[in-house]
Amino acid sequence: MKLYIADKTCSEAVQIIANELGIEPELVHFDVFGKSTSNGDDFAELNPMQYVPLLVLNEDHKELLSETIVVTSYLADQYPEAGLIPPHGTLARVKYDQLLVFIATEIAQKHIPLMRKLMTEAGIAWTSNRIVAAYRILDDRLSDGRRFLTGDTLTVADAYLWATFWGDRSGIDVSHLANVTAWKARMDAHPSVMKALRDEAEVVTAHRALIAEQRV
Ligand SMILES: N[C@@H](CCC(=O)N[C@@H](CS)C(=O)NCC(=O)O)C(=O)O
């Protein structure tokens, strides 16, 4: 199994879930701006949309999964005993998917034009308000003392939300939201999150060295 990742992006969610499951996909770094990959693959051939995460399930590159929700949920579904996502066909799963779609559409994707500095002042204000309002809903969810978004253990939604915490690049500040801030600190200290960052740094650094030598 091969996982295409990019530096400090939503692909970290997949890494965290893989770590929770004890799976070690081969990590390949995609340079979002230069478009090269750390192993020389032509990423546009694999994913014409040229975004990560992309999970390659088999050697002949015929089974590819994109979309953060899909990739993380697929892995979690393979190991129901790990309890990283509720079972399909249950109301609990539908509500869980609702939470994942909320994170994807109201937080993750709304950050991107902000990070890329593509918006007017009015657009920045509107989008920022929407994102902060979405974080506030998650802050309320955490206000009952639970340690993670759906209970006392890390699940797929936590991995996804953590991997889209891009305030330093988007200008979104949620430090006034005490429950989200405490949750973020718990996530930062979580072994699966720390391993994801270490593994990511290793493959990104190696790729950048190759780029500097102009070998990819
Ligand atoms: N619909 C995709 C979007 C993924 C996405 O936006 N990936 C970003 C990183 S978080 C990316 O690779 N962007 C590449 C680019 O913008 O060129 C998903 O939900 O996974």
Image (cartoon, grey):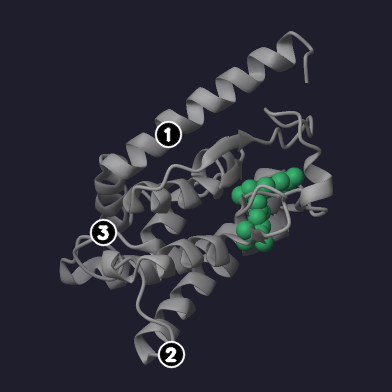
Question: Residue 173, can we see it?
Answer: no
For disc 1, the marked residue is 197
- Quarter of the figure that contains the C terminus: top right
Give the image location of residue 187, x and y in percent: 30, 47
Give the image location of residue 74, x and y in percent: 50, 66
Considering only order in the chain, which callout, 2 or 3, is on the residue closer to the N terminus?
2
119 vs 145: above or below: above
Amino acid beneath label 3:
Asn
For disc 2, the marked residue is 89
- The numbered disc on residue 80 is none
Mark 3: which secondary structure? Answer: helix
Mark 1: which secondary structure? Answer: helix
Q: Which of 201/148 is in front? A: 201
Amino acid beneath label 2:
Gly
Local packing at callout 2 (Cα closer than 10 Å; few below 14, some 14-19, many 20+) is few
Local packing at callout 1 (Cα closer than 10 Å; few below 14, some 14-19, many 20+) is some
Which residue lies at the image location 55% right of the left edge and 50% below the top edge? 10
For disc 3, the marked residue is 179
Local packing at callout 3 (Cα closer than 10 Å; few below 14, some 14-19, many 20+) is many
Which residue lies at the image location 67% right of the left edge and 28% below the top edge? 38
Q: Are marks 3 and 2 in contact (CB under 8 Å)?
A: no
